[in-house]
Image (cartoon, rainbow, N blue to C red):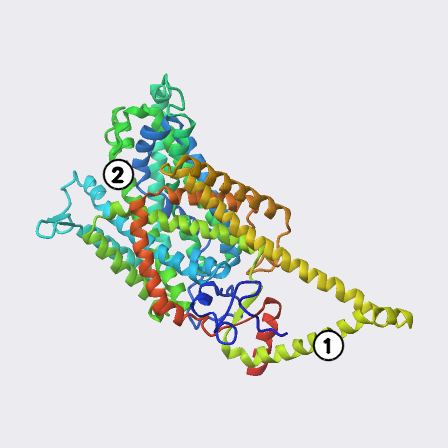
Amino acid sequence: MGLLVDSKGEGGGGGSGRNGGSWGGRHSLIRRKQVDSVHVKSGGHQLAKELTVPHLVAIGVGSTIGAGVYILVGTVAREHSGPALAISFLIAGIAAALSAFCYAELASRCPSAGSAYHYTYICIGEGVAWLVGWALILEYTIGGSAVARGISPNLALLFGGEDSLPAIIARQHIPALGLVVDPCAAILVFIVTGLLCVGIKESTVAQGIVTIANVCAMIFVVVAGTYLGFKSGWTGYELPTGYFPFGVNGMLAGSATVFFAYIGFDSVASTAEEVKNPQRDLPLGIGAALSICCALYMLVSMVIVGLVPYYAMDPDTPISSAFASHGMQWAAYVITVGAVTALCSTLMGSILPQPRILMAMSRDGLLPPFFADINKKTQVPVKSTIATGICCAVLAFFMDVSQLAGMVSVGTLVAFTMVAISVLILRYVPPDEVPMPSSLRESIDSVWLRHGRNSQEINVEDPKTSVTKPLLEEVNITVELPLIKKQLPLINYTLSEAKRRKIAGWTIMFTCVGVLLLTYSASDLAIPSFLRYTFCGGGGILLLLGLIVLTCIDQDDARHTFGHTGGFLCPFVPLLPIICILINVYLLINLGADTWARVAVWLLIGVVVYVFYGRSHSSLEDAVYVPVAHADEIFRSSETYVA
């Protein structure tokens, strides 16, 4: 009896000290932290709450629409979609929206820095959260470096050609080292880093200005391209091969490729702690940013594939060459400006989230406290931002990281998958224990004594009333009967609720296993046919049964009060998160062996860091876990003791 909850019981949380010393390293992997609340203090580390919906839209659109769209249009149209490119972008946008719905609910319920790392730590556990955070660090570092490296060639085009930049910032080849250094990329990273250190509002306004320039360039492509299309008769659509020259499968393959053009809206969630009204503004910001990006992508693709037949597109400069074929060579300058501004806004969007993830991990004790420092004047994590900028600048200066671009996708897709799983956990088996610092031991013991005594009295009465029930009825002592009527339904309810949570937890796990079996066997053609079909069938059955069971059983009542209430709720649960998991895992498996080999090395380094530092320095190392129902009472009791 009492409030101290064994971490091995329902809820899956866990703490150290009194509860979890016997678990050792295994215990640390599943301990979960509490949603930040008015009671949870972060030791003075507070970010400035300056952002509103327009700021979030600027971050989301700026982080999502990169210069890749100016090339992606030609490549995907030539190899996969043909004239159906706009449909590929639409399907990819819908798939991205599934993840956006999941992000929107968790961002509004748990509005603190850290994005997917933060949500995973609350809903799944410390071990998986560490891997998610570590993967996101890799994503933003390589992503920022790759974007910075791509700016100088586009910038050179504005000055007349590839070798037109001043020698001091132009790319230089060093034969002795076999390197092509890029001073321009490093300088741009340092400029963006300095801007991010000034303040979140100032840097977001700057990103908004650059993003507007990029959007204007895309609107120019749409308007001018539409004029040329009506003038020329839309020759790209008058083809004997029809609208789907590669079939529906080709169009779907194009969707899988352009899906990565929507990566970036998760940057909005990373700024949750700096939003004035996160319950309202975060879902609106994420939804508006994704909608704008999808609309622009579809409009640009519809225009370009109509100007030039898909098979005649230039894979490197499809938009510029399309306008040049209609006598508008000067349009290349406008498109180049759009590409440069898109890269600059994406660079800011790549560097912005990483300091906040480092800060969140440092707050939780998994990284050194250096990264958690907040500048008192600017109210941003300056030290983390500078560290991020130096790493990105060095990498961009010395290395061409384009071959590592797949590693960026791994981090994003892993984050998307864990966010969708977290939504299922939140709805069906939300944490029923919360960690309390060991400093509140006196308050915990005080509340335990009160509830422990009451529980003992009830337990003493239960056997007596149940055993002597006929005697009580015979002597007509009716005082005990109301106790029997009230207690038995409570006991039955407790047992049925525990059983429901257990069924839901196992169902979520087996559903994820089914997704993994299905996607892997469907993607790996090297597996013998018999095993392949067996795994496909088994995975499909597990997935279908999981969907049916989760649909039939009730969601947990605690979902209504979990975290910060009053925000966005993901629709069509459990169907929508399960589809989201299926799509993301399929894309993860198809990234290729080389990409996974590189990511495995990085994750192995992360495991070593966690084992030798993060596990023992975690803020939950000495936490005591108590039932959620008594958390507020313990905090009130602690305030009474302090008073």
Residue 116 image position (x, y, % from top left):
44, 55
Tell me, yes or no, if residue 533 can be seen here. Answer: yes
Give the CA distance from mark 1 to mark 2. 78 Å
For the view shown, which residue lies furthest in the top direction?
240
Residue type, mark 2 in image: Thr
Q: Quadrant of the N terminus?
A: bottom right
**Disc 2 secondary structure class:** helix
Residue 446 image position (x, y, % from top left):
61, 80
Image point 51% across, 52% down: which residue? Answer: 509
* 451 over 166 or under it: above or below: below
Q: Mark 2: few, some, or many residues within 10 Å (few <14, many ≥20)?
A: many
Number of callouts in the render?
A: 2
* 273 over 326 or under it: above or below: below
Front-lying residue, 389 or 412: 412
Residue 49 image position (x, y, % from top left):
45, 61
For the view shown, which residue lies furthest in the right direction?
475
The residue wearing badge 1 is 457
The residue wearing badge 2 is 336
Residue 3 image position (x, y, % from top left):
60, 73
Q: Mark 1: few, some, or many residues within 10 Å (few <14, many ≥20)?
A: few
Asked if residue 329 lies left or right of residue 570, the reply is: left
Asked if residue 17 lies left or right of residue 351, the reply is: right
Residue type, mark 1 in image: Glu
